[in-house]
Amino acid sequence: MLDKKKEARNARKGGHNRIPAFLKNLRGVKNWKEAATWLEWRGIEDIECITPDQAGVARGKMMPSKKFTSNTSLALPSAVFMASISGEYPETGNGFTYPEDDGDLKLVPDLGTLCVVPWESDPTAQVICDLVHQDGRDVEFSPRNVLKRVVEQYAEYGLRPIVAPEIEFYLVHKNPDPDYPLTPPVGRSGRPIGGGQGYSIAGINEFDELIDDIYHFSESQGLEIDTLIHEEGAGQLEINLRHGDPVELADQVFLFKRTIREAALKHDTYATFMAKPIQEQPGSAMHIHQSIVSLEDGRNVFSDENGEETEIFHHFIGGLQRHIPNALIMLAPYVNSYRRLTQGEAAPVNTRWGYDNRTTAFRVPSSDPSARRVENRIPSSDANPYLALAASLACGLVGIIEKTKPDTPAETAVNKDLIELPRGLLEALALFETDTALQDLLGRRFASTYAAVKRVEFETFMRVISPWEREYLLLNV
C-alpha cells in the first residue's frame, strides 16, 4: 500500500506521462472499474455517499472504500427526506402521507461526481447519490430528482436550460449561543470588518488565508470558481460559478456550501448562508442566470438569427412574472428568508423585469445575442440549490408552454414600490398549493411533501419567543 501511495504521489507530480484522463480529472469517472482504479490510485480509505434532503443538507452514509462496489447496498429510511430543518416530522393531511412501511430508499452513486474530501485528515472521497425506490423508480420528492424532472421536460420540447448561480454568504464570529446576535469577524488587520465594502479588494484581503483554503478545497474537488468579490455587508462575500448544466451546477453549489463552511471552521469562523443573518446588514442572495439552447444545434433560443429577442425569450420572462410568487416557498424557504425581501434594499420585492436594471426581479444583463440570458434575483442563499433551480426553470417553462406575455420592461427603480411578493411563509405556501401547472411540472408527490415540511417548520418557529416580543410586549401590554 505504501508503494502504491508513493507511486500515486509521483504521478500527481508529473512522474508518469501516461496517466489515464479519468485519473487526472477529479470528476471524470464514468464506470465502476474506473472508480475502483481512481480510489486505489489516490489511496482513498473512506467514502461519504451523500444526497441532499429538502433543506439541501447532506444525508447519507460513510463506508470503507474497499466495500464501495456496484453491489454495495446503500439505503436510507424514506422519512429522512420528510423531516424539517429542525428534525421534526409533519402531520399527514393536505395530500401528504407517509409510506405505510417507511421502507428504505436506495442511494445510487453518480460516479461522475466522485471527488476527494480535501479537509479530512485521512484520505477520503465523496460521491453524490440519486435516490430511487427498491424497484428502481426515481423517488419523486428527492430534490435532485425534482430538478432532473424539470430538465427532462425541457428536453421534450427540444430545449436544454443553461444556468450560472451566484452565491452570497457571510463570515461571522463563532456563535454557540443562538440567543446572541451574530457579529462580523475580525480580519487580518485585527479590527472588526465593517459594511460598505462592495467590490473592495482590501475587504477580500482581510481573509486571504481563508479564501486561499476555499480555492484549494475547490480545486481539489474539481469545482470551478469564476470570480469572488466582497459584497456590501460586513464580512459578506460572493462566489460566481461558470455556466453549465443545471444538475451539475446544483451539485457544485451543494458541495460549495459544504466546502466554504469547512474552510471557515478551519479559521475558527462560521460561514452562514442565512438569508438575513445580521440585523441592519444586506441579505444574502443566490442569483440565477438562465438561458436556453436548442438540443438540435446548440443555439441560444432567446435570440434569433438576426440577434433579436425571440418569442420564447419573452414567454420565459412572462412565466417567471406570473408563477415565481407561487414558487417563492422554494426560493425563500424559511421565515428568515422574508426579512431579506424588504423595500428599498438591493433585494427585489417585485415581479418586474428590465434591461440591466438591478431593482427588478428579473434582470436582462448586457450581453451579445449569443449570451442573452435572464437573471432571477429573487432566490436567497438559504435555498436548496436543486429546488431553487427547479422552481425558476419550471416557471419559465410554464410561460413557454402557455405563451405567457410579459409586461413592459421597467426603466426606473422599482424596488421602492409596493411589495408584490408574499410577505411570509404561510402566504407563500398558500400560493404554492394553488398553482397546479407548476406542481404538475415539479411533481405532485414532491409538492405535497415539501408543503407539509414547510408547515411544520412554521409551527416550530411559532413556539419560539423572540427578543422583539420581550422588548416591546413584556412590560407594555
Image (cartoon, rainbow, N blue to C red):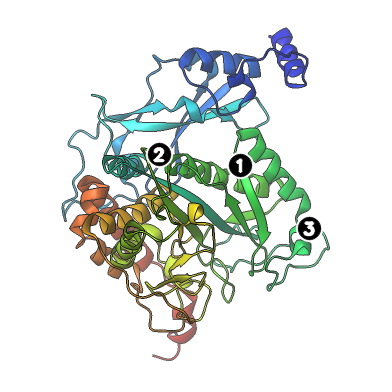
Which label lies toward us, 2 or 1?
A: 2
Which residue, given by chain and number where applicable, does mark 3 sit on? 205
Near mark 2 (Cα within 10 A), the count class, few <14, some 14-19 or many ≥20, is few
Residue at the image position 52 percent from the left and 71 percent from the top? 358
Q: Is residue 167 above or below residue 127?
A: below
Residue at the image position 37 percent from the left and 56 percent from the top? 392
Q: Is residue 109 left or right of residue 6?
A: left
Give the spatial CA distance, label 3 vs label 2. Answer: 44 Å
Q: Is residue 334 above or below residue 242?
A: below
Answer yes or no: do the residues labelled 2 and 1 have beta carbons within 8 Å?
no
Is residue 464 or residue 421 the one in the foreground? Answer: 421
Q: Is residue 412 left or right of residue 98?
A: right
Which label lies toward us, 1 or 3?
A: 1
Residue at the image position 56 percent from the left and 23 percent from the top? 46
Is residue 302 or residue 3 the one in the foreground? Answer: 302
Is residue 172 or residue 251 the one in the foreground? Answer: 251
Q: Amino acid at mark 3?
A: Asn
Which residue, given by chain and number where applicable, does mark 1 sit on? 224
Quadrant including the C terminus: bottom left
Q: Earlier in the sequence, mark 1 or mark 3?
A: 3
Q: Amino acid at mark 2?
A: Asp
Q: Earlier in the sequence, mark 2 or mark 1?
A: 1
Q: Amino acid at mark 1?
A: Glu
Give the spatial CA distance, label 1 vs label 3. Answer: 21 Å
Near mark 3 (Cα within 10 A), the count class, few <14, some 14-19 or many ≥20, is some
**In the image, residue 291 lies at what x, y percent?**
43, 52
Which label lies toward us, 3 or 2?
A: 2
Does any portion of residue 156 appear in the rendered image? yes
**In the image, residue 187 lies at what x, y percent?**
77, 60
